[in-house]
Image (spheres, rainbow, N blue to C red):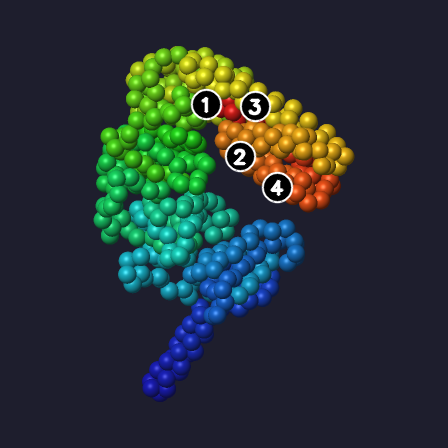
Amino acid sequence: MRKKILFIVLVVFLLTYSFVFAQENKFYSSGEYVVGEDIPEGEYQLIIEKEQIYSSFKRTEDGFDGDIIEIENFNAGVFFVTLKAGEYFSLNNAKAYPISSVFIYESKDGNYYESMYRVGIDIPQGEYLLTLSPNENYASFTRFEDTDEFDIIQIDNFEGNRYFVTVKDGEYFKLNNCFATPVENINAFENANDWFTEGMYRVGVDISAGDYKLTLVDGEDFGSYKRLEDTDDFDILEIDNFSGNGYFVSIFDGEYLDLNNVIATPIDLVEPYISENGIYPTGMYRVGVDIPEGNYFLNLNEGEDSASYKTVSNIDDYSINEIELFEENGLEISLQNDEYLILSRCYLISEISKNENQNYSEEFEKLLSDFSDLTDELLIDVIMFSIQVGNEPWENEIKLKTVKLKSLAEQIDRSLNSEESKQLLEAVISFEVSLTTSIESEVKLEELTEYIVLISVTKELIKDPIFLNTINE
């Protein structure tokens, strides 16, 4: 009797355990579900189905096409989501597993690859170095407070091959196009160059404290940098963006320096800036090193309606000596040794260069005037050309005018070196070739007229004030 009772108890236990085990390992395939009816409410881990490139899910209310509560796409690893009764859940190319049946992730090599993790369960809390995945040039990460409302604690993206972040127990941590390595498992950054490429660095560990000049990566028009107090709350000590000649910054031990489209060079390795024509473009300068102290004039960059400048006494806290916004050219300023000058959307010019530039501008305008007059004469001559064919003195006269026109076009091209000036020179050369052919064989009045009209149109473009302003600059 006792054996029979034990047998019955054992059978009941096995049936109960098997039922619970089966319930806990149940998964939901791609499809549409009413939460609370087709699928229980609660937290789920989503895993991409085999041989699928990406997957997605959507939570809505008032029907599967109703207002969206949450929608996400993911193409690697897993994703966590919490469903509530009454919601509508659409799942594509993935399986949903109840959180109770999910295994804890264990890293085999100490790294954590593109996926979503429960901090304190799948990944320990702490600081991590993020590195771009192979063949990627852009990455991002997100720290979530939960998988219900998906309240974001922090979200950021980066292009350099280094970024630091600190995660805490209870958070959810999602990586995209990058992997995370605990900082205790990495060595200090070993720099093979005198300068530091874009990325994030620990000051005093990866990069020495001190003064640096920041310059743009080749091909970039703008760059930015951040000085951070930590990688937990990402308290920003300083943030700025710049264009042009460069920027100067001081960094201190314990901080983090984040560079975007920027290269940082220690100040003792930076050569003084040398202006070839007394003009200093948008950027930052050390007065007494890059630019002599004295009086200068500020002009707007081409196409700008307003600009600004400021002088600071140091680059530790950027204490401002003077700052001004202006809208007209010719603003006069005075610079003193040991201060820094920051130019935004404008350029600086010395009194001597200003006078020389003005003289050059006047010479160029006379050059354009001579070219314009000669073009007008040739336009009339071309029309008369068919009547005067065979008149050798007249033909010699039009040849001489064409040679002079070509010489003027070459001078204009040397001065401007622009696409328009080159088009002008090419049109004049084509006119000269066509004229020679016409004199030696038959008159091509229509072709000659087309070239001279093209010359006239291009000439008017070059006479536009924008091009004259280019010469002034």
Asked if disc 1 and disc 2 are in contact, CB closer than 8 Å, the reply is no
Q: CA distance from mark 1 to mark 3?
A: 26 Å
Which secondary structure lies at badge 4? helix
User: Tag on residue 367?
Assistant: 3
Pointer 2: residues within 10 angstroms few (<14), some, or many (20+)? some
Residue 406 picture location, percent across and down: 57, 33
Residue 335, x across and y down, in percent: 37, 14
Q: CA distance from mark 4 to mark 2?
A: 23 Å
Q: Which residue is mark 1?
A: 347
The image position of residue 255, as x and y in percent, is 29, 35
Cβ atoms under marks 4 and 2 closer than 8 Å: no
Residue 430: name its quadrant: top right
Which marked residue is nearer to the observer: mark 4 or mark 2? 4
The disc at residue 433 is: 4
Which comes before the other along the chain, label 4 or label 2? 2
Secondary structure state at the residue bearing disc 2: loop
Tell us which disc is closer to us: 1 or 3: 3
Residue 252, relative to residue 185: is it above or below? above
Residue type at tag 3: Leu
Is there CB contact under 8 Å for labels 1 and 4?
no
The residue under label 2 is 418
Which amino acid is tagged 4? Val
Q: Residue furthest right?
A: 387
How many numbered discs sit on the rendered protein? 4
